Image (spheres, rainbow, N blue to C red):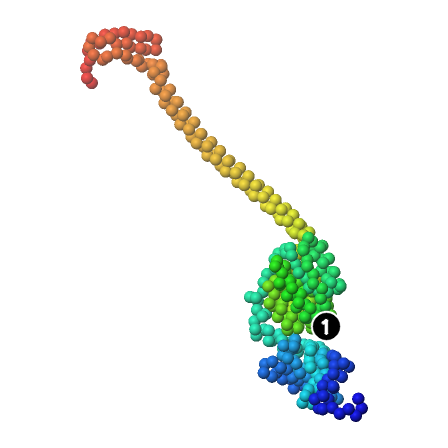
Amino acid sequence: MENVLLSVSDFVALTNQTLEYAFPTVQVEGEVAEFRISQGKWVSFKLKDDGAVVNCFTALAQMRTPLEDGMRVVVIAAPRLNPKGYFNLNIRAVKPVGEGSIKKGFELLKSKLEKEGLFALERKRLLPRVPKHVAVITSTESAAYADFVKIINERWGGMNIEVAHTQVQGIPAPDQIIRAIRYFNSLEVLPQVLVIIRGGGSAEDLSTFNDEPLVRAIAESRIPTLIGVGHEVDHTLADMISDVRAATPTNAAQILVPDKQEIIRSARAQANSVGYLLTQAIDSYSERTKDNLNAAFSRIQEKLDGTFEQLGILRVVVSQLNPENVLKRGYALLRGEQKIGATLEIETMKHIITTEVQDVRQK
């Protein structure tokens, strides 16, 4: 190619072909400066270190995490020489690096989503008490997934679990997880719960779950979401946007299903408690019934005693009025009509006397 005469356009094109062949993509780390958004569609900024500066350019839709000046990032980009003679990095992906920049990106996106109301409690959905059909998105090669399945089987078992294997860290991870979310949401029969889990890791490892498109995909899921990422002290935007947050993958399994042994123990305890309360109630009822019967018997006895007393009095009266007793006291019984010429019988204790009425006078 020595002494080849090139036009400017050909030179730029040849340079870009050479760059594309030699460096189809590069990863470059540096500090963001002069961050700009143009026309609501394009992003430009400078990536710098102590010795150099390079221009970066991308579409706003390519930005997965909000940026601002001073943040340290790694860009995955294609180097290009544009027709105006400027050397650019055409950005394909950007991710903050270092604890400070990761935290800053987290706070910027959190504030943005918060203003949209995506963390509001009224958006949260309840999980079914014992789901029968669950979708899980994770790395099936991870210890987190093995622990999750082990706990599910120990606590309940018999659940239909569909698994989508994805990466859970690194540049490809967010898009893989998004595709899995969309797949499960497209099923004719939706799973009852969508579970996303991964074990612990560094802030950079967990930054996958602070990816804006991924967080929005979780928010848009038609299936209630349960997210268990990292350890209890770790917090991601995926946790915050989900319907239910689990502290760990193991905790996600514990939240998802109850412990059948604990339910059995609880049922037995409740049965024993009910049995005790029932015995107490029966004893109390028996005691009250006994007291009521005794009181009733006492009232009946009182009435009987009163009745017997009245009968005794009546017996005396009747005895006194008995004709035989009257005769014993020296009286006589008179039978017949009390008119002149009539015959009368006079009965005493020992005799019956027949006589004729000679005279009847008024007293």
Considering every residue shown, the one lying at the far right of the view is 2
Can residue 29 be seen from the camera position used here?
no
Q: Above or below — where is 352 with respect to 250?
A: above
Considering every residue shown, the one lying at the far front of the view is 4
Q: Position of residue 233 (x, y in %)?
A: 69, 69
Q: At 62% from the left edge and 63% from the top edge, which residue is drawn?
A: 185
In the picture, the quarter occupied by the C terminus is top left
Q: Above or below — where is 94 with respect to 184?
A: below
Looking at the image, which is closer to me, 24 or 217? 24
Q: Secondary structure at mark 1?
A: loop
Counting labels gives 1
Within 10 Å of disc 1 (Cα), the crowding (few <14, some 14-19, many 20+) is: few
In the picture, the quarter occupied by the N terminus is bottom right
Q: Above or below — where is 319 with respect to 285?
A: above
Q: At 62% from the left edge and 74% from the top edge, which residue is drawn?
A: 110
| Quadrant housing residue 302 | top left
Q: Is residue 3 left or right of residue 263?
A: right
Q: Above or below — where is 294 with respect to 261?
A: above
| Quadrant housing residue 35 | bottom right
Q: Position of residue 336 (x, y in %)?
A: 26, 11
Q: At 67% from the left edge and 55% from the top edge, which residue is drawn?
A: 160
Q: Position of residue 357 (x, y in %)?
A: 22, 9
Amino acid, disc 1: Gly
Q: Position of residue 324 (x, y in %)?
A: 36, 14
Looking at the image, which is closer to me, 39 or 262? 39
Q: Which residue lies under the disc numbered 1?
A: 170
Q: At 50% from the left edge and 36% from the top edge, which residue is drawn?
A: 293
| Quadrant housing residue 280 | top right
